[in-house]
Image (cartoon, helix red, strand yellow):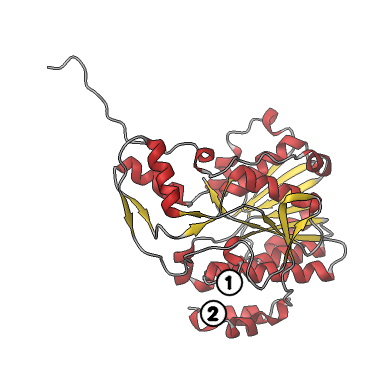
């Protein structure tokens, strides 16, 4: 018998920062630290990868309270469990609630009286939402509307709405619903002077739940080929820390109605991205092209051709875009015009959209 057994370990992904075609940005959060200290905060989608990182970042700066809202109890517990009372430093409350429940969200906001809301709750998987249009609309549009309305009714000072580059010149259900959410956020910004409503449009966040790295990590562990939709497809990538820093600083540099977009230089082709993984893994890695899935773009953009973007005067790494406002009362008509109404499995969604504030 052999003296020892050699264990062959599957290749693993390198750190996220090593996969960027640039240096990771380290944003200065000094102004945000002054802004958030002593304020009551509420985060929707707090159990998600970005929402949870917002919570952890907030706790570094002594807010008066952190209210974590999510409909997934396990996700909330997973965020809270690693935190000791000493780690938290500020009162932390977990709230099980669905943003689609207008009355429930209204009560949560009324009872917690936040000064700042980070709205990160959303459905975000492109191909899946192509088959579940009603679910996407109910969460990404009507759920957002519930948060915006509750903020206005309860005197919230700042609302930061997390959006996506899929909302720029949207072709997917995800992109369309997030673009509508941007537009109704802008509508509220123009009409509610007591609340500063700001959109933040992010690129593809590496390491977030459901990102391409999750897929690649699982495939590498199984010794399977890496699936790539198209090696010519281009994407804008950023890290979770970069995304959260921009969301936080939006409270400081964002004016009501702004849509803030990170200036991410040039996009990266998926072929280049996979080549970086191959170079760092150190073992042969097979790649298989699967073709673009429903709703996916070959080339993503951060700003649509018809949008006007200008450098932010306070931060040269951020662009400021103004999206066209949309009165929520016109949602049902917009569904019909956009062709989404005929794809809804439940016609009642159109009726509910028509009754929106």
Residue 39 rendering spot, x and y as whole percentages? 82, 45
The x and y percentages for residue 214 are 44, 47
Q: In the current view of this chain or complex, which residue is farthest to the top?
A: 3
Q: Position of residue 69 (x, y in %)?
A: 65, 52
Q: Is residue 113 visible?
A: no
The reply, left or right, for residue 319 in relation to residue 232 is right
Q: Is residue 103 left or right of residue 73?
A: right
Left or right of 34 in this view: 344: left
Quadrant in which the N terminus appears = top left
- Assign a secondary structure to mark 1: helix
| SS for dot 2 | loop
Whether residues under marks 2 and 1 lie with C-beta atoms below 8 angstroms apart, the answer is yes
Instruction: Name which quarter of the figure residue 285 lies in.
Output: top left
Q: Is residue 226 visible?
A: yes
Tell me the residue at 68%/67% (across/down).
Answer: 182
Point out the tag, 2 or 1, that comes first from the N-terminus: 1
Find disc 2 in the rendering and name its residue.
340
Residue that lies at the very extreme toward the right in this rendered image: 193
Please name whichever residue, 91 or 343, is drawn nearer the observer in this view of the structure.
343
Q: Work out whether residue 326 or residue 273 is closer to the camera in this orientation and state it.
A: 273
Identify which residue, 9 or 356, lies in the foreground: 9
Tag on residue 176? Answer: 1
Residue 100 to residue 45: above or below: below
* Quarter of the picture holding the C terminus: bottom right
Residue placed at 78% from the left, 40% from the top?
A: 63
* Residue 182, above or below 2: below
Mark 2: give few (<14), some (14-19) or many (20+) Cα within 10 Å: some
Q: Which mark is residue 237?
A: none
Q: How many residues crowd around disc 1 within 10 Å: few (fewer than 14), some, or many (20 or more)?
A: many
In the displayed structure, would residue 308 be above or below residue 348?
above
Q: Residue at x 71, y 41 (%)?
A: 27
């Amino acid at each position: 018998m052999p003296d020892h057994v050699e264990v062959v370990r599957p290749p693993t992904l390198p750190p996220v920062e090593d996969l960027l075609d640039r240096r990771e940005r380290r944003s200065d959060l000094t102004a945000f630290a002054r802004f958030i200290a002593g304020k009551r905060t509420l985060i929707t989608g707090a159990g998600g990868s970005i929402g949870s990182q917002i919570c952890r970042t907030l706790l570094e700066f002594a807010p008066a309270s952190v209210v974590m809202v999510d409909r997934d109890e396990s996700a909330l517990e997973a965020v809270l469990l690693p935190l000791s009372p000493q780690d938290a430093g500020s009162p932390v409350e977990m709230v099980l609630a669905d943003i689609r429940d207008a009355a429930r969200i209204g009560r949560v906001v009324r009872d917690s009286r936040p000064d700042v809301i980070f709205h990160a709750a959303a459905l975000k998987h492109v191909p899946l939402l192509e088959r579940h249009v009603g679910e996407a609309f109910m969460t990404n549009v009507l759920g957002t509307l519930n948060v915006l309305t509750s903020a206005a009714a309860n005197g919230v000072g700042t609302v930061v709405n997390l959006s996506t580059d899929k909302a720029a010149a949207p072709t997917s259900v995800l992109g369309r619903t997030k673009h509508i959410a941007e537009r109704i956020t802008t509508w509220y910004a123009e009409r509610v002077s007591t609340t500063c409503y700001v959109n933040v449009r992010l690129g593809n966040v590496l390491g977030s739940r459901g990102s391409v790295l999750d897929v690649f990590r699982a495939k590498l562990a199984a010794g399977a080929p890496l699936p790539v939709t198209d090696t010519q497809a281009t994407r804008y990538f950023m890290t979770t820390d970069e995304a959260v820093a921009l969301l936080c600083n939006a409270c400081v540099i964002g004016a009501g109605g702004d849509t803030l977009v990170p200036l991410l230089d040039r996009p990266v082709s998926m072929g280049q991205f996979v080549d970086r993984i191959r170079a760092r893994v150190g073992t042969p890695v097979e790649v298989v092209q699967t073709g673009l899935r429903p709703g996916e773009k070959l080339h993503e953009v951060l700003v649509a051709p018809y949008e006007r973007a200008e450098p932010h005067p306070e931060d040269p790494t951020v662009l400021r875009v103004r999206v066209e406002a949309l009165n929520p009362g016109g949602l049902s008509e917009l569904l019909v015009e956009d062709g989404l109404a005929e794809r809804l499995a439940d016609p009642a969604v159109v009726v509910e959209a028509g009754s929106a504030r």
